[in-house]
Amino acid sequence: MLRKTSRMALVILACGLAVGCGKYKRLADTAIKTADTAVASAGDDVAKYAADQWKQITDSVASAKDSYAKGDYKAAIASLQDIGPKIQAAQAAASAKKTELENAWTNLSAGVPQMIDAIKSRVDILSSSKKLPKGMDKAQVESARSGLDAATSAWTSAQEAFKSGNLTGAIAKANGVKDQAVQIMQSLGMTPPPAAAPAAK
């Protein structure tokens, strides 16, 4: 009788575990599908402008799928427990960073071309001048002209990066042009404008 009761208890326990496993498996399956949908609809900006947070999110999804494949459904669910708020936070951070970069580009695109134009005007005047300012020679003027050509080309590259949607790359290039323009202006005895102050990287 004891043996029969023990066997019945084991059967009941096994059934209970099967029901529990089935429940957690369904929940894990739903959680993973929901996470996949949320990740897919989060937008490209999140990966671009909140890369660290985005990696944490995708790592959590990968971990959940790995646990699911191993049959550890509770761990799969736990990995995705706060995935929704994490995605929302990443979207907010990406939006803020993109706005910051767009503002930086607006400032750079207003200031850098003016610096380039001012340098060109100064170089043209010096090149046609019969007598250069004290302490300046023709080699300096020619060096400034070469630097101006390089800066102009680099600025075109920055604009192309912006048009292609690469804000980070565009600003990096634009800041490089700005720094180069400052050096040229100083070599020509010019005073760089306030727009030459450091901008967002």
Image (cartoon, helix red, strand yellow):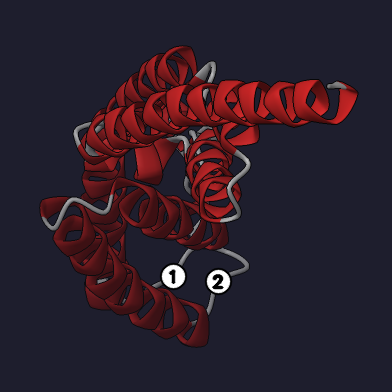
Q: Which residue is mark 2?
A: 136
Q: How many marks?
A: 2
Give the image location of residue 41, x and y in percent.
19, 33
| Residue 91 or residue 15, whichever sits in front | 15
CB atoms of marks 2 and 1 within 8 Å:
yes
- Element at badge 2? loop
Identify the amino acid type marked 2: Met
| Residue 201 or residue 127, whichever sits in front | 201
Quarter of image, res 6: top right
**Which residue is situated farthest in the left direction here?**
163
Q: Which residue is mark 1?
A: 132
Give the image location of residue 73, x and y in percent.
56, 35
Q: CA distance from mark 2 to mark 1?
A: 6 Å
> Which residue is painted at 46% across and 82% down in the image?
143
Seen in the image, is 86 located left or right of residue 99?
right
Identify the amino acid type marked 1: Leu
Above or below residue 70? Residue 147 is: below
- Element at badge 1? loop
**Which residue is situated farthest in the front direction here?**
1
Quarter of image, res 187: bottom right
Seen in the image, is 181 located left or right of residue 130?
right
Give the image location of residue 82, x and y in percent.
53, 16
Above or below residue 87? Residue 156 is: below
